[in-house]
Amino acid sequence: MGSVASSSLHKRYDVFLSFRGEDTRNNFTSHLYTALCQKSIKTFIDYKVHRGDQISSTILKQIEDSYIALVVFSENYASSKWCLEELVKILACKEDKGQSVIPVFYKIDPSHVRTQSGSYKEAFVKHEKDEDCRQKVLKWKAALTQAANLAGWDSCNHPDESQLVQKIVNDILQKLYRRYPSEWKGLVGIEDSVRHVELLLEKVPIVGIWGMGGIGKTTIAKAVYAKHSFLFESCCFLENVREESQKHGLRHLCDKLLINLQKEENFIGSSLKVESSTFEMRRLNNKKVFIVLDDVISSEQLDYLASECDSSLGSGSRVIITTRDKHLLIGRVDEIHEVKGLNSQNSLKLLSLNAFKENHPKVGYEELSESAVIYAKGIPLVLKVLGSLLHSKSIETWDSTLRKLAKYPNVRIQKVLKLSYDELDDVEKFIFLDIAFFYKGEDKDTVIRLLDACGFYAASGIDTLIDKALVTISNGNRIQIHDLIQQMGWEIVRQESPTDIGRRSRLRDTEEVYNVLKNNQGTDAVEGIILDLSEIGDLKLCDDTFKRMTKLRFLKFHSDKRSCNVYLPSGLKQFSGQLRYLEWNGYPLDSLPSSFCPEKLVKLYMPHSHVQKLWDGLQDFVNLEGIDLYGSKQLIELPDFSKASKLKWTDLSLCESLSYVHPSLLSLHSLVTLRLSKCKSLKTLQSNIHLKSLEYLFVDGCWSLVEFSLTSEKMRQLDFRGTSIKTLSSSIELFSNLEELYLCDSLKNLPNKLSSIKSLKDLSLANCRQLDTSNLHILLDASRSLRRLCLNYCHIFELPHNINVLSWLHELRLDGSSAESLPSSIKHLSGLQILSLRDCKRLCSLPELPPSIKKLDACNCISLETVFTIATFRLPKRNDNKRFLFQNCVKLDEHSVYGIVEHAHFTMKEAAYGNVLIRDEIPIWGPNDYNRGAFCLPGSRVPDWFKYQTKEASLTVDFSSSSDLLGFLLSVVFGKFPSNEKYAATIGCECYLVDGGKVGYTSNWYNTDITQLKSDHVYLWYDPFFCDMVLMAVKERGVISDHSNIYNPKVSFKFVVTIYKCGMNVKDHGCLIGMKECGVCPIYASEHHSFMNQMKLELKYSDMTKRSREEQEKEHFPPTKRLKESSMIELDD
């Protein structure tokens, strides 16, 4: 692999070897030099016999051009003026250039060197007699004394000379590796990957490094090899196995491997048979070796090179294999490290090092550099190529080059990325190109079915693409492909016909597709077209536009707009019979071409089309899996689907003219999903056939629907909201697997058979005002698997007491009910997290609620007087978002207000402390993982425990002596809105640093109805992401010192309210919309223990007073009681 210092740009040699030739040239020094070379340590040694006194300028230059000087002191070293001059120069380089110096005392007492005694004294007696040397003697003696005082090696302590040589070599290697990382200027962002590979090698002998082309596999392997190869008896970095095997064959590579491991340049002849390598490998049986096989592309290469090594190498040996093909590694290595792209910060640094020779972009090039980073998508090779390409270029050239690259990839980048494509077979190449053009971001299973319909054996092919790092599968089972890999695929197709676009197999460039279609230039070469209609103007097509495209498999005209800008004034004669996928948003004709045979069609998407009917008669839909005619408002009738035996889903939502569903559709045993939402003309939906596969049926918004008679043994979700169905037949019991049921507001009675469905998890009776709920308790008792129960705006005066049987209940909605209280048994709903009581105007009291509650909405409960103290003592959880709203609960008594405020205090600080603990336990931490808190209730004052308060819209916070600051709580008091109109509003808090700079993030309380407040209200919230952003920004600006506990106090918080009125946003700092007070409460880590104990005491004492009304009246608790800061009492959990 060359010198271990090959990555360095500064020094020519790793080691300069200084020695007395007549003493050690043919023994110790020779052995030492050989050992250094075997470890790829580039060493300068002067073999000439010097008889003059004057040291040559060449030697002085080589000393300067070395990292380490290795000085071998021997019996006659001091007698050589040449050696002494070398030593003086070496020590000068140590002083001036930081050169490392290692003395070796070979058969000489170090004290003789240090004090110039023994043979060294005799040498200096002679030097002092020489007039030319007298002035140098003092300098030479000082050099010897200084060198002898350095840490080095004494041969007297190591009688085994071979062991001494090995220890010296290892010492040098360690010094080199400590030096080189700071000098590998081209290596950016590989530290984590190197460390992970090192950890794997500590556990297992064989590790694979896998990733796409140009991602840095070889670089990582080289770094690991350079750091650790000195620990092994033999080592070999077999670079570029792909290219070398193609040029010279595997026999040559095996020979090269053995030569490097045995360090015998001529022991294998070019004509030696393969069988003889077995003997050579056996010679390594007891050797601890380190082998890297770089860029392996075939199992043949691995079987030839790695398998024999694996069985023959000595204990402690290690092997690294780098490849683009993950499949090659499976079963052949013990662990696999996948190399990911660089993050944006490291990408920018690597680009800048190559483009500007600095760690950051030049002034004026910042935006262009960011664009280049976005283009590279974290691939180191691309960043290096771009940096070199754009080095010393003008801003205009940068801009022009980046715009060109968006359409025409760089040849060097293309060549590297295309290597993986070239290894695919023909079918795999078809699959890859289809994905690159049409299927990025699509569901993997859907893509497999579409490609299988083309005869491509897609499951196997996609697995191969994944193994070769050409595509990936996201967590949502979506196929993803790196932008540059995708662009590589586009370029491959472009090269099919660089000038005649209509002769290419796949078309996706908007301008190119537009011109081909407009000028009717399509040919039988075209297999797929994709066009975003929102990117073009009006497009008129001839009736025979697709006539010559006889191989067209894929056609997609998509748009976010409902209107269509493609016109067919003369109609359309035909589509290719090879079509598997047809999507045409806003299709302009009233039917498909009569000659179109959809025998091979798998997907038909025509949302917002103008079709009245698809076609006449019975068609052979043997491969059709899905139809989407969403929003086709002119659709009158559906065709006969009797032969559509594979049809799984149909979306006919918003087909407002459709009054009748063809019975063949309701007879398909393959049908899984049927969407008929808002088909307002649909009156009946009936089938005499008990379906076997239908799981999801949506008829919500079909307000004319009065008759429903359809059953399926697999039905999981039924949505009747917005229909006119008044009764459900007893056949509903046949939906034995039903999980979600949404009933309509016309329903008057719950069928008795409903209670026989034990699988129900989500039941909604929202707006069923005419519904008789007297049997609700029977239904609840039978529906013990319910997770969500929605009884919004039902005619309910009392919630059944057996509500506690719903032990799995997660969400309960009672908005607008007429209940005056809730049953005390509700506290036993241990899984309940969401309780919504909005607009329950008769509700007078809230009982004890389960500690699992996260969101409680009691807004506009205008009769609510008492709330049982809410106290939750639980270990912090991830993403524990608490929200308790009591807006317009104007009758709340003082004790309840106090309890809510103290609960808010405890909950929000508990969330802050919990975030610290969770950060330590969760390695990957994002904004959605934070614990949060938000509270709203009637009140005219910011709580007393807020350290910073003001009646203005802004305040300045003093964070002095607060090195353990975790964040802060925020509070605003609003009065009644001056207008009776209802507007949406957002409360926000902005932070401005001492220099006037605003922190980019604003903490918002969204969707509040402050315009409907009946009195003054207090808003309290804890936004941890905002806290972190503020503290981070403060640190970055130097306001908070990382080296002291002194905080600059000038951090300003400004509270703003944005009113959304008639499409306009009006931002105000509170003076016009009733903001009365605001406050900020810092949270400190040091207060955690005492705070938790005090809160337990306060809330326990509050519960005691709650149970004793007499005691409560004697000891009045103000609504904003200030927490005492002394007399903390420890309580057991």
Image: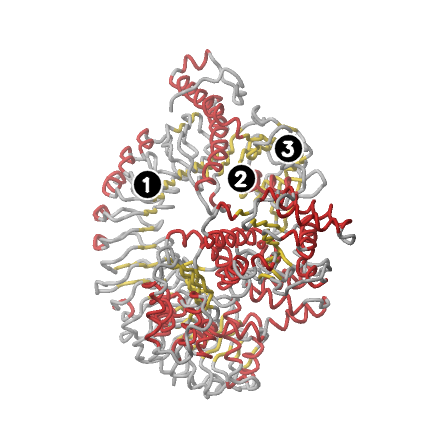
Q: Residue at x 59, y 64 (%)?
A: 383
Image coordinates of residue 317 in percent, x first then y, are 38, 58
Asked whether residue 627 is in view, the answer is no
Tell me if label 1 and label 3 are in contact, CB under 8 Å.
Answer: no
- Residue occupying the point 49% across, 24% down: 1091
Q: Position of residue 1115 (x, y in %)?
A: 47, 13
Q: Secondary structure at mark 3?
A: loop
Residue 1090 in the image: above or below residue 298: above
- Quadrant occupied by the C terminus: top left
- In the image, residue 570 above or below residue 856: below
Residue 233: quadrant of the picture: bottom left
The residue carrying mark 2 is 1024
Kind of residue sitting beneath label 2: Pro
Q: Which mark is residue 988?
A: none
User: For mark 2, does the 10 Å Cα neighbourhood hold few (<14), some (14 to 19), or many (20 or more) residues?
Assistant: many
Q: Residue at x 59, y 40 (%)?
A: 987
The 10 Å Cα crowd at callout 3, few under 14, some 14 to 19, many 20 or more, is few
> Could you say which is closer to the camera, residue 1050 or residue 1018?
1050
The residue mark sitting in front, 1 or 2, is 2
Circle 3 is placed at which residue position?
Answer: 1044
Q: How is the image coloured?
A: secondary structure
**Looking at numbered disc 3 in the image, what kind of residue is underneath it?**
Ser
Mark 1 surroundings: few (<14), some (14-19) or many (≥20) residues within 10 A: many
In the image, 928 versus 405, the foreground residue is 405
The location of residue 113, given as percent across then percent down, is 62, 45
Foreground disc of the pair 1, 3: 3
Q: Is residue 540 visible?
A: yes
Residue type highlighted by circle 1: Leu
Percent x, y of residue 37: 52, 62
Circle 1 residue: 809
Where, by quadrant of the figure, is residue 824 drawn?
top left
